[in-house]
Image: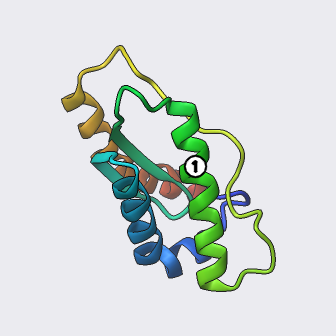
Amino acid sequence: MISKYRRKNRYNQLQKDIQQIIQDLCQWKGIRIVEGNMMPDHVYLLLSILPQCSVSSFMGYLKGKSAMMIVERCKFGNRNFRATGYVASTVGLNTATIQKYIREQEKQDQKEDSLSRKE
């Protein structure tokens, strides 16, 4: 999930609130968070979703409800907090590989940021 305009300053201020909102929403639907990582402008999640719940319906719920809760909690002027779309993969890689990828994304983003600043 990514924020609509990649507003890094808002994510830095709200990181703990956003983590709690995502945890609550997943728990309410019986979805287990296997791994997660908050970046300044997006979120990585590895979720264990129940077979009767489709990925697209859950992501619609998670993105829509979390955006409304963030806007309500933080009193933003509009509800266009999240960008449209998400990336989901249900096959192809084992869980350990995905968990490692999620954990290492912060380091990778920091490397890319430092390289782009040098240019």
Answer whether residue 1 is visible to the viewer in this image: no
Q: Position of residue 106 (x, y in %)?
A: 37, 54
Residue 4 is situated, as x and y percent measured from the top left of the image, at: 71, 57
Closest to the observer, 107 or 46: 46
> Would you say residue 56 is visible in this rendering?
yes
Q: Which residue is mark 1?
A: 61
Answer left or right for 75 relative to 94.
Answer: right
- Name the residue located 19 percent from the left edge and 31 percent from the top edge: 96
What x and y, as percent, mark residue 67?
63, 64
Q: Nearer the viewer, residue 89 or 65?
A: 65
Residue found at x 51% / y 78%: 14
Query: Looking at the rendering, which quadrant does residue 17 occupy?
Result: bottom left
Q: Residue furthest top?
A: 92
Residue at the outermost right position? 78
| Image position of 55 (left or right of 6) | left
- Which residue corresponds to the image point at 35% horizontal and 14% vertical from the top-left? 92
Q: How is the image coloured?
A: rainbow
Residue 76: x, y in percent? 73, 80
Amino acid found under the numbered disc labelled 1: Tyr
At label 1, counting other C-alpha atoms closer than 10 Å, the crowd grade (few under 14, some 14-19, many 20 or more) is: some
